[in-house]
Amino acid sequence: MSVPAREVGGDDSAGRLVRPFTLTGGRTRPSRADFTLITTLMAVDPPPVRAPRPQPEQLRILRRCARPIAVAELAAHLDLPVSVVVIMLCDLLEAGLITAHPPHPVSARTPDLDLLQKVRDGLGRL
Amino acid sequence: MAGSDVTAQAATAPDTVKILVAGGFGVGKTTMVGSVSEIVPLRTEEPLTVAGLGVDDLDGIEEKKATTVALDFGRITISRELVLYLFGTPGQQRFWFMWNDLAIGALGAVVLVDVRRPESSFAAIDFFERRRIPFVVGVNGFHGEHPYPAEDIREALALPEHVRVLLCDARDRESCRDVLIALIDQLIAAAVRAD
């Protein structure tokens, strides 16, 4: 699968919002909405054979993602704003170099008793 | 890569949940996060442009001044599959719009109240009540001292019956843990009622 976004995207991050190339290989480009503060990231190991060569800044992220790490933690370690990190994560996700695990869904209408009990037990062990 | 299959087995991404710690500026939010977190609280700073500060902030718009808003957070590993994050909300009231993003998907919140100036936490209480986000109130005693009983503070804050009010010490790990447990117990009680 080709990943043309890198070539066409340039480095103008402000332009990403309006850039017309929203489809890549028949797949919707990952959006910033895929990354919450507590979305867990992991580097894909080994990286896909046809993945583009990561930029130095991307390598820094990939090294941090060797073990699961939340977006907020990554941003804090890199000393970068979350909004900036998320833009870079979009590229890495698109290139197949990371996976993003969404937070546990929380709904006020249908509370998850099992989850709450697990959290309570965990806090009790503190 | 040698051994990569082992790595893949060992490291699966855990589920994550979050609880917010809110309250007025300087009420002890970061202290509380630090007391129960397994890591030294981390900070991320987000640049904001005045365009984000709201249309009524005319002075700011004229000046086009950039500012940042800081988020402090900590982590509690519940199990290999589940990690809890605690986020201290930005103390300045004018950053309320950022709470919206933060609040989405939160289990609930702890509103910290300083007995010497409870009014500084009114905005936080309002915020969670309006959005029907469950919360408990932790009354952070100055030097750990509590001149008023919890019930007096409940009355002063006009809190409904189901919202628990706890006297606490943000510097104390067990005290903060008990506030978090009270929040989860309140959530469990509400879930059982709804069943």
Image (cartoon, coloured by chain):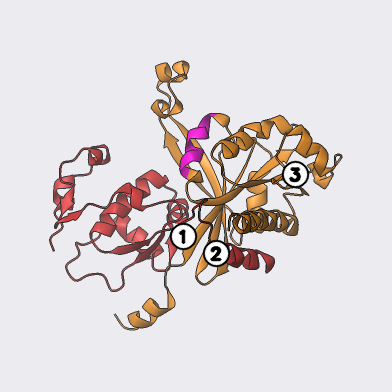
Chain colours: A red, B orange
Specify whether residue B49 is painted magenta: no
Q: Which mark is residue B140?
A: 3
Q: Mark 1 = which residue?
A: A104
Amino acid type shown at disc 2: Leu
**Image quadrant for the C terminus of chain A?**
bottom right
Give the alpha-carbon distance from disc 1 to disc 3, as whole Å: 30 Å
Name the spot of residue A32 as percent of width and height, x first.
Answer: 33, 48
Q: Mark 2 = which residue?
A: A115
Q: Residue at x 52, y 41 (%)?
A: B70
- Residue B160 placement: quadrant: top right
Amino acid type shown at disc 3: Asn
Q: Are marks 1 and 2 in contact (CB under 8 Å)?
A: yes
Q: Would you place residue B51 above or below residue B34 in this image? A: above
Name the spot of residue B175 as percent of width and height, x first.
Answer: 75, 55
Chain letter for the residue marked with disc 2 in the picture: A
Q: Are marks 3 and 2 in contact (CB under 8 Å)?
A: no
